[in-house]
Each structure stands twice: as C-alpha cells, then as structure tokens.
Image (tube, helix red, strand yellow):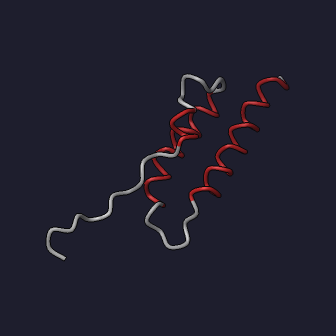
Amino acid sequence: MFGKKSPKSPPLPDLLQATQAGQVRTAAARRFLEFCQQDYLTHTKADGFDPQVYLDAVKLVLNRLEATRHME
C-alpha cells in the first residue's frame, strides 16, 4: 500500500531498441517500426498481452517490408 511504487511499463524490448529507424532501409518499415514503438507501450498493461508474440509479429512484418525493397 503505502510506500509501494506503482508498476512501470516495461522498457522497449531489445528487438525494437536494436532495430532503430536508421538501420531500417525502407520508408514503410521505418513507419511501421515507429508505430510499433508507440503501440507496444499502450498494450503492455492489457490482460493476456504476450510481449514475445508481439515482438515475433513485428520482426516478421519488418522482414517482409524489407524484402519488398529487393523485389523492385
């Protein structure tokens, strides 16, 4: 109760920290990464939120967006 700090949202996962916008080559991937960095913090307190599933999904989408660069 008293003297207890409220739980803080966890820091951004390593994947999002390691994959900065400067390392992402396509504009679509950069915009998606920026969205995910903001979106992640809004969902961390939701019931049933699994950060690993979220990170896996982000990684999958970023890989696909980056792969489209080589297809053009």
Residue 52: x, y in percent? 62, 56
Of the pair 49 and 27, the residue shown nearer to us:
49
Quarter of the picture holding the N terminus: bottom left
Residue 51 found in image quarter: bottom right
Residue 16: x, y in percent? 54, 40
Horizontally, residue 54 falls left or right of residue 67, namely left
Q: Residue at x 56, y 38 (%)?
A: 33
Image: 23 above or below 31: above
Horizontally, residue 53 falls left or right of residue 6, namely right
Q: Residue at x 54, y 22 (%)?
A: 22
Image: 68 above or below 22: below
Of the pair 69 and 55, the residue shown nearer to us:
55
**What is the residue that sits farthest to the bottom in this orientation?**
1
Residue 69: x, y in percent? 76, 25
Residue 3 found in image quarter: bottom left
Residue 71 found in image quarter: top right
Callout count: 0
Q: Residue at x 81, y 23 (%)?
A: 70
Quarter of the picture holding the C terminus: top right
**What is the residue that sits farthest to the left in this orientation?**
2
Image: 22 above or below 9: above
Q: Residue at x 26, y 65 (%)?
A: 6
Residue 35: x, y in percent? 52, 44
